[in-house]
Image (tube, rainbow, N blue to C red):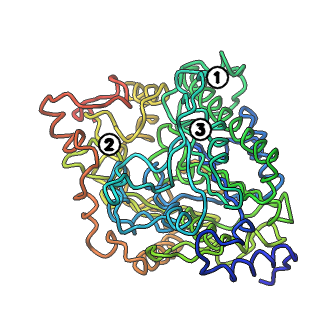
Amino acid sequence: MHLKLSSKIMGFLLMGIALWNCQPNSTQQSDKPNILFAIMDDATFSHFSVNGCKWINTPNFDRVAREGILFNNTYTPNAKCAPSRACILTGRNSWQLEEAANHNCFFPAKYKTFAEVLVEQGYHVGYTGKGWAPGDAGEIDGKARELIGPRYNEIKLESPTSGISSIDYARNFTEFLNDKEQDNPFFFWFGSFEPHRAYEFGSGIEKGGKKLSDIQEVYSFWPKTDSVLTDLLDYAYEIEYFDQQLGKMLDELEERGELDNTLIVVTADNGMPFPRIKGQEYELSNHLPLAMMWANGIESKGRKVDDFVSFIDFAPTFLELAGIQQNGMQAIEGKSLSNLLLSNNSGQVEASRNHVLIGKERHDVGRPHDQGYPIRGIVNHDYLLVENFKADRWPAGNPETGYLNCDGSPTKTVCLEARHNTATEKYWQWSFGKRPEWELYNKVDDPECMHNLAENPAFADILEELKETMYSELKEQQDPRIMGNGDIFDEYVYAPENVRNFYERYMKGEKMNTGWVNPSDFESTEIH
């Protein structure tokens, strides 16, 4: 597709070519774009006011979209914190990252991050809040490895609720900028801990001024109770808190005259921390918000782009715009988004960006022998297909160990309690019950992925076509799960020693750390 490029954009691209092999401290480095990467912890695509949500107000996310681009089809390959963030940092799908496919893992030394490359090439790099986590990044020369540069978390504030971090994200960003040499470009990772659980129950109403009546509908796989509505409003309040911190950072950049030459990227690592969403591989699990703003680079502002974007596309984008090679990185699977940024078109810009792959291996503890729940899937404009390779396992973790791949919450409790009544047991089944090997959903008509079409003969050709594409690409990517060695992911040990062999130790009566779920979440398998 022919793209009409402005003189400013052409200048950036020519500058990038000229600086391709530049060394740190080059006198031209001040011409490179700064990058502010703002990532929420657990937020679903639809919960932003620019996307039509009436009960969450996000003026700063909306501003980024309005003055830049709103991406309508952005997906993480793996809907859990550590593997999702590993995909961002390396430009590779989680199944291409060995141990880093898992949650709470050891990050393999062989996988260099784009941020480490930026540091080598003179960028001032750092982060506040949550970086790559949870897991162990290892050491280099006896020092903790900095996957995203040094941490800026020292400046604190009085948290508005018990569930919100005391880190003053905005002031720590200011401190980071104060440490920057004048001519150096920067990359900063703003990793909000919000809206990750736990929430202060009722904070959305008490401190956010919200009302239960603000929410007219909830997803059909949860009962619409006051507990669930209150839980959602608490989640909303924390998204708004993130948005406020983002606004302060935009203001700081404007005051310093740095905003126009800063690429602002705003997203989240996985879907909301509620049953059937976070840690699963459905539309609401992997489909995430994304807005980008860059006054010096995006001239056709306010566009909405429908191309499918994967988290593995961030790393090559940042390196290309900085005019830097992928020095020492393992081969990047993602594709730079520069054509989408520089185009004047809305809708589908590149015809080839018509689908993404998703999947997972082992997330949180709680199954015998530390086993995971392996999935691979493919998503296009119309359909989502997933294969559950071990359908005999519990998808959200075993009942007797608390369904540990689902954070404890009022909504989780309501769904678990629903099992005791035949009229409401469906709510338990939808979030925690076992699943078939194949699931196929028309995500246009059924975005909640409630009506499985996999056994419907009318959709057999669609299923086979999607399966063929998925398997072909996974083979090209040398996915161990497809190449016959998928069980290797269960053999990688958890990074924290105190949770290894969790299931066996818990069943023997050993006291284990289950602080992220409620005591009432633990059930007996005999009743299912």
Residue under label 1: 204
Q: In which quadrant will I find the N terminus? A: bottom right
Question: Residue lying farthest top?
Answer: 206
Alpha carbon of mark 2 to alpha carbon of mark 3: how far?
Answer: 22 Å
Residue type highlighted by circle 1: Gly
Where residue 359 is drawn, which disc sits there? Answer: none
Going 68% across and 33% down the picture, which residue do you hit? 240
Q: Which of marks 2 and 3 is in front?
A: 2
Question: Is disc 3 placed on a helix, strand or loop?
Answer: loop
Label 1 crowd bin: few (<14), some (14–19), many (20+), radius 10 Å = many
Residue type highlighted by circle 3: Tyr
The image shows residue 409, relative to residue 470, as above or below, that is above
Q: Nearer the viewer, mark 1 or mark 2?
A: 1
Q: Where is residue 153 in the image (x, y as percent from the top left)?
A: 53, 38
Identify the mark nearer the N-term, 1 or 3.
1
Residue type highlighted by circle 2: Gly
Q: In which quadrant will I find the C terminus? A: top left
Q: Is residue 144 visible?
A: yes
Relative placement, left or right, of 502 versus 285 is left
Q: Can residue 373 be seen in this view?
A: no
Question: Residue lying farthest left?
Answer: 508
Residue under label 3: 219
Going 37% across and 59% down the picture, which residue do you hit? 100
Residue under label 2: 397
Q: In which quarter of the image is residue 426?
A: top left
Contact check, label 1 and label 2, Cβ < 8 Å? no
Relative placement, left or right, of 178 versus 131 is right
Alpha carbon of mark 1 to alpha carbon of mark 3: how far?
Answer: 19 Å
Label 3 crowd bin: few (<14), some (14–19), many (20+), radius 10 Å = few
